[in-house]
Image: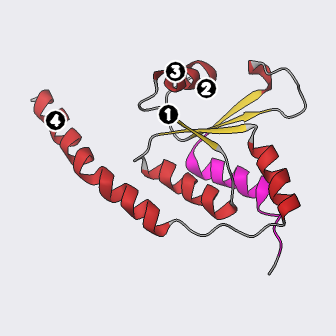
Amino acid sequence: MRLFVRLFFRLIRLILTPFMLLSEWLTTPKAISRSPEQQLKTDQACQQLALYQFSACPFCIKVRKEMARLGLNIEKRDAQHNVSHRNELQNGGGRVKVPCLRIAATDSPIETERNVQWLYESDDIIRYLRQQFAGDTTTK
């Protein structure tokens, strides 16, 4: 019985995944406008960030849409299919749960686990990104 339930849900995921990704592609908002200097500063700040995600996770899609809206070039790491990224998430964050934003401290030239923060929950990640990056836009 367990096997049939597991196969059923795999089939559902297999069917829904292309539709979810297509929906994300069609509904991703346009990026906010920044001056070239502001965008360069934002891109440099984003180098300290990495998003661990699954491609078809609805909460990951929600975070990726907000990243697109804010015009953020954050590295996306596939924790579903990439074993090394999955292990990094497990060892650094303590659990394999997505989405997870890895935030490295910018004031330390040497990266250690003590100056890396792991932020789970899509709403918390979006709140953090808005606090850090939503205020540096230009009006047109």
Measured as percent of width and height from the top left, residue 50 is found at 65, 38
Q: Earlier in the sequence, mark 2 or mark 4?
A: 4
* CB under 8 Å between discs 3 and 1: no
Task: Tell which of 124 and 12 is nearer to you.
Answer: 12
Q: Which residue is mark 2?
A: 93
**Residue at horizontal 57%, vertical 49%?**
122
Measured as percent of width and height from the top left, residue 128 is found at 72, 50
Question: Where 53 sits versus 109, above or below?
Answer: below
Q: Earlier in the sequence, mark 2 or mark 3?
A: 3
Viewed as shown, does residue 135 lie left or right of 49? Answer: right
Task: Tell which of 104 and 125 is nearer to you.
Answer: 104
Q: Quadrant of the N terminus?
A: top left
Viewed as shown, does residue 18 lie left or right of 41? Answer: left
What's the amino acid at mark 3? Ser
* CB under 8 Å between discs 2 and 1: yes
Q: Earlier in the sequence, mark 3 or mark 1?
A: 3
Q: Secondary structure at mark 4?
A: helix
Q: Which residue is mark 3?
A: 84
Measured as percent of width and height from the top left, residue 95 is found at 53, 25
What's the amino acid at mark 1? Lys
Label 2 – label 4 distance at C-alpha: 30 Å
